[in-house]
Image: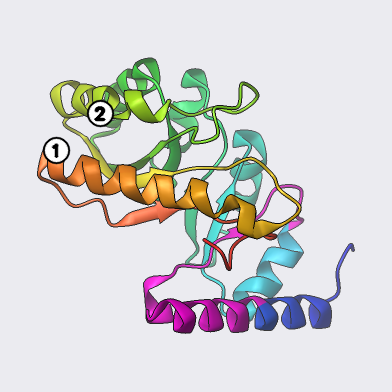
Amino acid sequence: MEITFEELKRNLERVRENIERACQRAGRGSNCVKLLGATKTKPPEVLRWAYELGLRVFGENRVQEFLKKWEVLSDLDIEWHFIGRLQSNKVKYIIDKVVLIHSVDRPSLVDELQKRASKKGLDKVDVLLEVNVGGEETKGGVEPENAPQLMEYILKNAPLLRVRGLMTIPPYRENPEEVRPYFRRLGELRDKLQEEFGMELPELSMGMSHDYPVA
């Protein structure tokens, strides 16, 4: 086991304290921040510990790994999110098992999500638009300037998809403060899309283990 229960407990306590302090500095309540545990490569036993310690939202990057954990942990009322790059041919395996898909970034994926949601008889599928705010070729995500076109495509062609907000993974920087402009840019883009399309986009999925207090 790569981590003990006590180590995980201390880590979660530290993260929650950091979130509380960051929210106080920003003049916001910590209840507006949702802590998501990224489960990539983590065994189900560790997820059970995290659940026991009060964590309810888990995000997985890989479809096969997600399906195994979803089955093994089906006795827990986990709120599962899919946070990795999603191939169109894998949509059918997860679309009715996750609460939120964070990585919608292209029309072909939108089409597949709409098709599979219809076949499954789903009322709505909640998604986030993944935005490549850093312009990195190695990462997925729609370019910020193309986000309005993708939003318009969804509204016109995918009535079963409900866009809840935006997601980004900014460039890595040793100093987390250097990432702040990317987070700010995502927030500004969200505000622009809300105004342009007259809709609420309450979710911003951003911040990882080294930069979440800045986010």
Q: Is residue 211 magenta?
A: no
Q: Nearer the viewer, residue 163 or 137?
A: 137
Q: Residue furthest right?
A: 1
Q: Which stretch appears magenta?
A: 15-43
Return the x and y of residue 147 as percentages of the image width and height.
32, 29
Instruction: Identify the image quadrant of residue 17.
Output: bottom right
Q: Residues within 10 Å of mark 2 (few under 14, many from 20)?
A: some
Return the x and y of residue 53 as percentages of the image width and height.
63, 81
Q: Is residue 102 left or right of residue 203?
A: right
Identify the secondary structure beneath mark 2. helix
Quarter placement of the N terminus: bottom right
Labelled disc at residue 179: none
Q: Amino acid at mark 2?
A: Pro
Return the x and y of residue 66 as percentages of the image width and height.
61, 44
Residue at figure coordinates x 75%, y 65% from the top left: 45
Q: Is residue 25 magenta?
A: yes
Question: Does residue 100 appear in the picture of this structure?
Answer: no
Q: Nearer the viewer, residue 194 or 82?
A: 194
Q: Which residue is mark 1?
A: 196
Does label 2 or label 1 sit earlier along the sequence? Answer: 2
Residue at figure coordinates x 25%, y 28% from the top left: 148
Q: Amino acid at mark 1?
A: Glu
Residue at figure coordinates x 14%, y 38% from the top left: 196
Labelled disc at residue 148: 2
Asked whether the beta carbons under mark 2 and mark 1 sit within 8 Å of each other, the answer is yes
Q: Residue furthest top?
A: 108
Residue at figure coordinates x 28%, y 57% from the top left: 202
Return the x and y of residue 18 as percentages of the image width and height.
61, 79
Q: Residues within 10 Å of mark 1 (few under 14, many from 20)?
A: few
Q: Is residue 142 above or below residue 206?
A: above
Q: CA distance from mark 2 to mark 1?
A: 8 Å
Identify the secondary structure beneath mark 1. helix
